[in-house]
Amino acid sequence: MNTETKMTTKTFTTEEGTITFNSKYFIIQGNNGNHTGYNREWEINAEGYKTKAEANKVYKEMANENGDIKYGLTPLRIVTADELIEIYNGSERIKFFNCFDIDVKF
């Protein structure tokens, strides 16, 4: 039985260029902004994850190492490429340059 996950990419085109997501899941960490997302800035982990189980493992490690995350003061989320695009198009800010599994061509 082959348990390998098929690699899928998703490309998003903006006015400035294209963004290609080479993993299925990403972990993002936000600043403390307010509850509506105003002034919220998200930072993407340096790598993406092929499975939700891989992302959950890293998520739990990050939460255990940082008390602000553990007690809900700093937001931490596992998201898909579609959710990253929603954040990009919304009122919150996100930068894609620090993740090895996202190709940005502007």
Image (cartoon, rainbow, N blue to C red):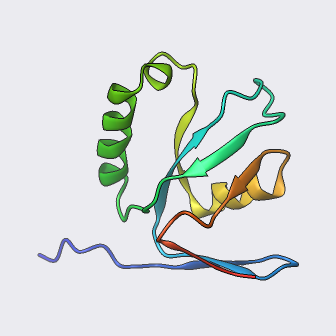
Query: Does residue 68 sit above or below 11 in this rendering?
Result: above
Q: Which residue is drawn at 68% across and 59% down?
A: 95
Relative to 87, 30 lies left or right = left
Q: Where is residue 77 in the image (x, y as percent from the top left)?
A: 53, 40
Which corner quadrant holds the C terminus?
Answer: bottom right
Q: In the displayed orientation, state which residue is furthest to the top.
A: 71
Q: Residue at x 71, y 61 (%)?
A: 85
Residue 21 occupies quadrant = bottom right
Relative to 92, 95 lies left or right = left
Q: Where is residue 89 in the image (x, y as percent from the top left)?
A: 82, 58
Q: Residue at x 38, y 40 (%)?
A: 59
Q: How many labels does the image show?
A: 0
Name the foreground residue: 106 vs 79: 106
Which corner quadrant holds the N terminus?
Answer: bottom left
Q: In the displayed orientation, state which residue is furthest to the front.
A: 98
Query: Does residue 80 sit above or below 72 in this rendering?
Result: below
Q: Where is residue 16 in the image (x, y as percent from the top left)?
A: 84, 79
Residue 62 occupies quadrant = top left
Name the foreground residue: 70 vs 25: 70
Query: Does residue 26 sit above or below 22 in this rendering?
Result: above
Name the foreground residue: 36 vs 30: 30
Q: Where is residue 11 in the image (x, y as percent from the top left)?
A: 65, 79
Q: Residue at x 65, y 54 (%)?
A: 83
